[in-house]
Image (spheres, rainbow, N blue to C red):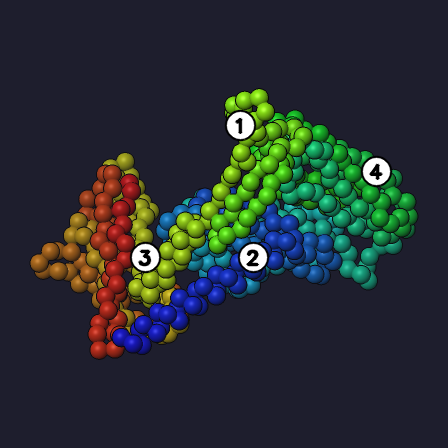
Amino acid sequence: MKEVKEMKLKSVIFAIIQAALFSILFTLSVTASEVSKIEGDGFTLFYSTVKDRIAANEEAVFKIQVKEDITTIERFRVKEFSTEWDFRTDPTYVQYSGQVLYPDELKEFTLYLKPEPNIKFGQHEVVMETQLENYKTASLPLYVYVEPVKEQKQLYAVDLDIQTEAPAAFDPRQDFAVKFTLTNLNKRDLPKIVFNIQSKLIKETITTSLTSLEKNKVVELKKQFDPKLKPQEDELVITVTVDNEVVKTIRRTISIVDYSDKFSERREEKNGILKITKTIIKNIDGKRYFAWDIALKPGDSSDPIIVTTSYRSFVFFVVLFFAALVFYYLQKSPIIVTKHGVAIEKTEDGITEVKISVSIKNNSNITFDNLTVTDTVPSIASVVQDSGFGPVKPNKILTSKKTGNVLVKWELESLGPGEDKILSYKIKPKLSILGSFDLQAATVRYPSGDKSVRVESNRVTVMG
């Protein structure tokens, strides 16, 4: 028991440190480059560019983050690209076997794109098809500019460097501005450079030019909006063409922020322990004023208006929350079992085949040995004896003489720190089932000291 408690305490500390490190790294990644997102069926993708201008023998690089938005364990997969592109991922298992995602979990990987040797030079839109298994696909457009390798590069080819400045958020009462800084890296004059800027709120075109080797030319779009424009998100898609050739596509997400007219007052403050007492003396001119209804007789003056802000209750609830969180981590099992069932074949008469998956995850930093996983199939269905089993086949499939239920059992030699395994199989109802039906919880047993610990999964309702 002492060993288990120490293990749980270490798991809590490790989880807190891991969450803090992830928060810091995610913040740094967001500030280092622009992050865009797309909404998929059951998940959200966040993506940013690391390198999108490459020679024909180089790789483009993108950072991809995927977050599951549903309440079941799923596997995220990347589909094949067009024949003009080869791709790989880091970690490599994302490319070959996919990424297991838990509810609200955020995972990150790096995507590398390499063009085929005979690819056409210039701007390319590379569409990545992604999905959660058994859900709809979502398309992620990535833009890569391909130029000749250094030894083959033409002296007078278009070689244009574009630095873009666009606000991530702006107040609609002020001018909105997008600024481009252009540098011509070759001796060729560029008499017509066209910026086509499109979004829900903006449809504008800017035309400019560059002389040979001209540097740091600034082109700016300024636009005024209705000052009462409601808060919303928008995405700018900026297409840059030279001589009718697309040389770059830029995407920027912008937010229109909520606002209220600002005003000020003169005040005196006294600080206490988690408490601030403010004495409002007088309003100063502004667009709006604080106002109070005060009745005064001739020659009278009012007492100061006292506003007291106390944070004591808030701090108490924060402390209580963290105490409950630590208690929860100390009490919860280091082995987490989650069950998921989905109807994969249906007819007009109802459900005819169901896929069941059981996920076992070790949330601790120690290894557990000799685990027994048992799942129960109701007597109205039978196990499909074919390739429906996942990579780990069950050791036994038994029928209970008392209930008629089928017991599917796996014997796992070990489960390492942070490791998770997905066990899957298929069942067929003996008769088609209209509507929905329930599945019992799966169980895991493992030894801990001189005792046997039993952990149950969630119960599952399969929808027709």
Mark 4 and mark 3 in contact (Cβ < 8 Å)?
no
Give the mark, 4 or 2, whose residue is nearer the N terminus: 2
For label 2, the SS is helix
Nearer the observer: mark 4 or 2; the answer is: 2
Q: Amino acid at mark 4?
A: Thr
Q: Give the class, few, some or many, for how many residues have Cα within 10 Å of label 4's Cα (few <14, many ≥20).
A: few
Q: Which mark is residue 394?
A: none
Q: Can residue 420 be seen in this snapshot?
A: yes
Residue 362 in the image: x percent, y percent?
36, 67
- Which quarter of the figure has residue 86? bottom right
Q: Which mark is residue 26?
A: 2
Q: Which residue is mark 4?
A: 208
Q: Amino acid at mark 2?
A: Phe
How many C-alpha atoms fall within 10 Å of the one at disc 2: few (<14), some, or many (≥20)?
Answer: some
Q: Secondary structure at mark 4?
A: strand
Number of the front mark, 3 or 2: 2
Q: CA distance from mark 3 to mark 2?
A: 27 Å
On residue 338, the disc is 3
Disc on the earlier residue, 3 or 4: 4
Instruction: Determine the residue positioned at 27% across, 57% down.
Output: 457
Could you classify mark 1 by the number of other residues whose Cα lies within 10 Å: few (under 14), some (14-19), or many (20 or more)? few
Vertical position of residue 440 compared to residue 233: above or below: below
Q: Earlier in the sequence, mark 3 or mark 2?
A: 2
Separation of residues labelled 2 and 1 (CA atoms): 46 Å
The residue where tag 1 is placed is 292
State how far apart marks 4 and 2 are (Cα): 37 Å
For image coordinates 12% across by 56% down, the residue present is 404
Q: Nearer the viewer, residue 369 or 232?
A: 232
